[in-house]
């Protein structure tokens, strides 16, 4: 079976050997590993900031993004999931504008309209201070000018050639990514402002979510006329390590109806797998995500209380991706052995599971520990009876 066939079989809970992927790695980790023995065959851009992400097979890689090919190859990982190169948000992009220039950082209005405090060294994450939407007029203007569901300007210049690659692919192909029903309003309103908008301007929030849903349906309807896809990726990051950033009641009122409408459309177009990316403790939102049509979730952060074995007991048909503790890899081989032995046999027996780290592998993980972990995990996958 190729990577695409294996992915689809695992997602259907078929008794096949699961796919071998990692979510990704901090650039600082890969740079460290080169110093500790990882062979540099392909390399990564040395200009990448320490906090930049280097994609693994599970992250929905796109051409032009950093891919950890050396790690993937030496660890015998499967062909990467690819995400279709379609602009599903602001188009045309704003022109970036530097508003303030300081010694170590700049204040800019970035190309999707966010006021951003950006480190010049690129060694720390940017702070998003406010989004482009403060009023209904702001939203109506942005929607009219930059959220038209037309393919013009949203497709890569090599779209016809790309379609042929997609048609004959051996890798899973995803649509979406970078958009979500909490994630996108966070860009539009601001990271703090979005939380108060549910209470201060509920009518506007309802309108934004309804309009976004209709926009994505109209846009993806055209794409699905041309290309068959294997999954929809939805990015939310709606939780932190103590629970959801909004209450289940707020999710149910504002976000659940758009989810149901969106996933119903996808199913009508033959898309069976709707997989949500959200960090943190998602226990309280799991039943609502499932009710909304979500079929799978990743990456299940262990330090936020997400134990994939416990999730599997509660949700026997939920596709689960990730859930291996980064902390175990920092602690060493005994911790790695314990982590894998507790989780992997149970999860492989249950099916519908792709094991990998519970987020990007951090630079505190040595190459020796990472290679030991990945070798042992591969062996457990290969030896598991089908």
Image (cartoon, rainbow, N blue to C red):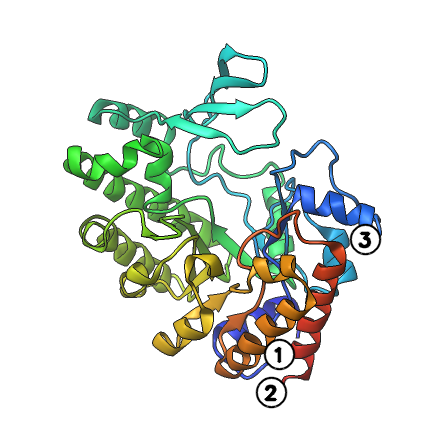
User: Helix, strand or loop at disc 2?
Assistant: loop
Position of 104 with respect to 216 (left or right) is right
Q: Nearer the viewer, residue 53 or 259?
A: 53
Q: Nearer the viewer, residue 213 or 240?
A: 240
Q: Is residue 371 above or below residue 61?
A: below
Question: Do we see residue 319 in this rendering?
Answer: yes
Residue 125 % position (x, y): 53, 34
Q: Residues within 10 Å of mark 1 (few under 14, many from 20)?
A: many
* Residue behind mark 1: 17
Q: Which numbered circle lies on residue 128? A: none
Are circles 1 and 2 on residues that touch, CB within 8 Å? Answer: yes
Q: Nearer the viewer, residue 286 or 12?
A: 286
Q: Is residue 321 above or below residue 83?
A: below
Position of 280 with respect to 32 (left or right) is left
Q: Is residue 4 above or below residue 81?
A: below
Question: Do we see residue 168 in this rendering?
Answer: no
Residue 327 % position (x, y): 57, 58
Are circles 3 and 1 on residues that touch, CB within 8 Å? Answer: no
User: Helix, strand or loop at disc 3?
Assistant: loop
Q: Nearer the viewer, residue 215 or 256?
A: 256
* Residue behind mark 3: 38
* Residue behind mark 2: 386
User: Helix, strand or loop at disc 1?
Assistant: loop
Please name the residue shown 49% across and 74% down the image.
Answer: 352
Quarter of the figure that contains the C terminus: bottom right
Please name the residue shown 37% across and 40% down the image.
Answer: 184
Residue 270 % position (x, y): 41, 65
Which label lies toward us, 3 or 1? 3
């Amino acid at each position: 079976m190729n990577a695409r066939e294996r992915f689809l079989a695992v997602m259907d809970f078929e008794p096949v050997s699961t796919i071998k992927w990692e979510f990704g790695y901090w650039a600082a980790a890969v740079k460290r590993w080169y110093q500790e023995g990882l062979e540099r065959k392909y390399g990564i851009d040395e200009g990448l900031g320490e906090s930049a992400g280097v994609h693994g097979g599970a992250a929905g890689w796109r051409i032009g993004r950093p891919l950890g090919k050396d790690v993937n190859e030496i660890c015998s990982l499967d062909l990467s999931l690819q995400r279709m190169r379609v602009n599903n948000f602001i188009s045309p992009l704003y022109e970036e504008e530097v508003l303030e220039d300081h010694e170590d950082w700049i204040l800019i209005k970035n190309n999707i309209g966010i006021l951003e405090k950006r480190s010049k060294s690129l060694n720390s994450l940017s702070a998003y201070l406010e989004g482009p939407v403060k009023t209904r007029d702001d939203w109506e203007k942005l929607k009219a000018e930059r959220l038209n569901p037309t393919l013009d300007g949203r497709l890569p210049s090599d779209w016809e050639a790309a379609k042929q690659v997609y048609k004959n692919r051996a890798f899973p192909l995803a649509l979406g990514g970078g958009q979500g029903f909490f994630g996108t309003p966070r860009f539009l309103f601001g990271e703090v402002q979005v939380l108060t908008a549910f209470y201060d301007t509920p009518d506007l929030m309802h309108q934004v979510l309804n309009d976004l849903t209709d926009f994505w349906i109209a846009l993806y309807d055209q794409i699905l006329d041309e290309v068959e896809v294997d999954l929809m990726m939805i990015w939310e990051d709606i939780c932190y390590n103590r629970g959801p950033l909004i209450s289940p009641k707020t999710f149910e009122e504002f976000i659940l109806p758009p989810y149901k409408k969106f996933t119903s459309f996808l199913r009508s177009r033959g898309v069976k797998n709707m997989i949500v990316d959200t960090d943190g403790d998602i226990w309280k939102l799991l039943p609502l995500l499932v009710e909304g049509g979500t079929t799978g979730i990743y990456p299940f952060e262990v330090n936020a209380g997400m134990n994939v074995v416990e999730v599997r007991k509660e949700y026997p048909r939920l596709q689960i991706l990730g859930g291996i503790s980064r902390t175990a890899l920092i602690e060493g081989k005994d911790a790695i052995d314990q982590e894998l032995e507790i989780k992997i046999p149970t999860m492989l027996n249950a099916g519908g599971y792709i094991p990998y780290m519970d987020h990007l592998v951090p630079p505190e993980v040595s190459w020796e520990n990472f290679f030991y972990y990945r070798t042992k995990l591969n062996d457990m996958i290969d030896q598991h009876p089908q």
